Image (cartoon, rainbow, N blue to C red):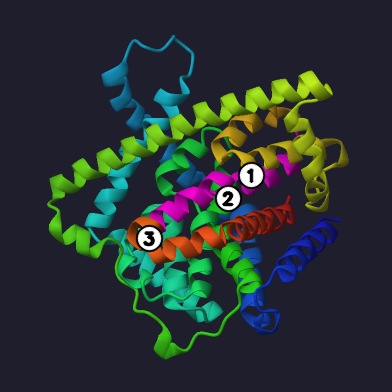
């Protein structure tokens, strides 16, 4: 039965992508099929094999330990502010991001992450035949995040066509930053977070091939630069540490501010809907997204609650949705929990359209204007990528 739901979900993604495609005649089936098969294989290895389970367990324990170490620094500064036995989301989940940000900065400074990104990107290039820049951004977005990644390719932005720009932005919105992966793991089962990060790289490129197909001559392909190469040459080690600390703090503060605003706004909308229609706004969203949840193979008695969480992520952000999901996860089946968890692990939401547009515009105003014009289509594509990743996981649950 899982295969039936998987094929139905795949058909849904392909139909919805095909309907809005810029150039349907240029859609290339071979690279799409190659990436899809790679996703299925990777999902099977990570979820259904002993090696995959051990690997994910190791990664989960590593991030859990890093979060504990990060909390140690938080406790030194804010010790005594928490109630014993009570977890404070800002202190225990968001502020440890600062420590993770420092580690990423060190790995970048030592050229370890750029090396990984380069060779994984080259491997993807051999698999899908897409441009080196597209594959570089797809991989580096999963490490650096949706806005920071464009800093590493700012010199190329001025020469990128509108078609290539859409693909780059879809990858950025479909990814997550490793700096906040540890935070996700406090709200979702760690194994689904790891699997989603891997699958989303392929899902974004598959959807981009559907919605935004184009031919790229080898001579037109751009040479990819190492992540942060120019910047790192100007910074000493301790300057880099200081900058990474400030970057981590900015992320934590921004996420906290967005949570305060979005959760309060959602509460207000829920209150007004309940007052006028005697039903909450999230329940309405649940019914809207219920057909998608059903096609993904979520049990019929859980599709409204699952759909509500999925829609909440779309209209607010993934943190708000994860917090809501955490409250009801124990009431859902393992299959539903896994599918919804993978769907939530991406930046595909309305606020990200503004974030990506602003990031690109800050580096190149002309290209930023292009991103703003296809913003809704960008959100549409990255949401389809999330549905595709969730469908693949559902095949093995």
Helix, strand, or loop for circle 2? loop
Q: Residue at x 45, y 35 (%)?
A: 255
Q: CA distance from mark 3 to mark 1?
A: 23 Å
For the residue carrying disc 1, how many other residues have a C-alpha within 10 Å: few (<14), some (14-19), or many (20+)?
many
Task: Please indicate whether residue 67 sits to the left or right of residue 383 in the image.
Answer: left
Q: Which region shows up in magenta?
A: 332-360
Quadrant in the picture for residue 225: bottom left
**Which quadrant of the structure image shows residue 274?**
top right
Label 3: which secondary element: helix
Label whose residue precedes the other's in the sequence (3 or 1): 3
- Disc 1 is placed on an element classified as helix
Q: Which residue is mark 2?
A: 348
Residue indicated by mark 3: 150
Q: Are marks 1 and 2 in contact (CB under 8 Å)?
A: yes
Evaluate whether residue 333 shows in this view.
Answer: no
Q: What mark, if any, has residue 242 been given in the picture? A: none
Seen from the viewer's position, the closer of residues 4 and 212 is: 212
For the residue pair 150 and 119, the one nearer the viewer reads as 150
Give the mark, 2 or 3, whose residue is nearer the N terminus.
Answer: 3
The rendered magenta stretch, by its main secondary structure, is classed as helix
Horizontally, residue 131 falls left or right of residue 149, namely right
Q: Which residue is mark 1?
A: 314
Q: Residue at x 47, y 36 (%)?
A: 183
User: Residue 28 appears at what percent x and percent y?
Assistant: 65, 82
Q: Nearer the viewer, residue 209 or 375?
A: 375
Q: Is residue 199 above or below residue 128?
A: above
Q: Disc 1 or 2, which lies upstream in sequence?
A: 1
Give the CA separation, mark 2 to mark 3.
Answer: 17 Å
């Amino acid at each position: 039965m899982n295969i039936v739901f998987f094929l139905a979900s795949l058909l849904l993604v392909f139909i919805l992508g095909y309907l809005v495609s810029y150039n349907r005649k240029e859609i290339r089936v071979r690279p799409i099929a190659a990436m899809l098969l790679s996703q299925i294989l990777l999902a099977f290895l990570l979820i259904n094999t002993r090696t995959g389970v051990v690997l994910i367990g190791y990664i989960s324990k590593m991030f859990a330990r890093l979060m504990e170490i990060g909390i140690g620094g938080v406790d030194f500064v804010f010790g005594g502010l928490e109630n014993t036995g009570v977890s404070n989301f800002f202190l225990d989940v968001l502020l440890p991001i600062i420590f993770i940000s420092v580690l990423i900065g060190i790995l970048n400074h030592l050229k370890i992450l750029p090396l990984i990104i380069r060779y994984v990107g080259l491997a993807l290039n051999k698999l899908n035949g897409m441009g080196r820049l597209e594959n570089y951004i797809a991989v580096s977005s999963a490490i650096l995040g949706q806005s920071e990644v464009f800093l590493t390719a700012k010199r190329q932005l001025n020469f990128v066509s509108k078609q290539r720009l859409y693909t780059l932005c879809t990858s950025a919105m479909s990814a997550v930053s490793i700096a906040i992966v540890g935070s996700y793991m406090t709200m979702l089962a760690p194994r689904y977070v790891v699997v989603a990060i891997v699958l989303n790289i392929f899902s974004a490129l598959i959807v981009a091939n559907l919605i935004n197909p184009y031919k790229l001559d080898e001579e037109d392909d751009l040479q990819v630069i190492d992540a942060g190469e120019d910047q790192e040459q100007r910074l000493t080690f301790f300057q880099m540490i200081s900058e990474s600390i400030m970057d981590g703090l900015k992320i934590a503060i921004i996420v906290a501010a967005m949570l305060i605003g979005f959760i309060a706004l959602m509460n207000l909308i829920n209150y007004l809907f309940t007052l006028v229609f005697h039903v909450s706004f999230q329940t309405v969203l649940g019914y809207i997204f219920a057909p998608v949840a059903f096609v993904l193979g979520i049990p019929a008695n859980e599709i409204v609650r699952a759909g509500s969480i999925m829609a909440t992520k779309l209209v607010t952000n993934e943190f708000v949705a994860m917090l809501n999901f955490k409250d009801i996860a124990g009431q859902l089946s393992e299959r539903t929990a896994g599918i919804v968890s993978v769907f939530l692990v991406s930046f595909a939401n309305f606020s990200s359209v503004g974030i990506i547009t602003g990031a690109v515009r800050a580096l190149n105003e002309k290209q930023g204007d292009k991103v703003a014009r296809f913003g809704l289509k960008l959100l549409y594509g990255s949401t389809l990528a999330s549905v595709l990743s969730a469908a693949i996981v559902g095949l093995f649950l």
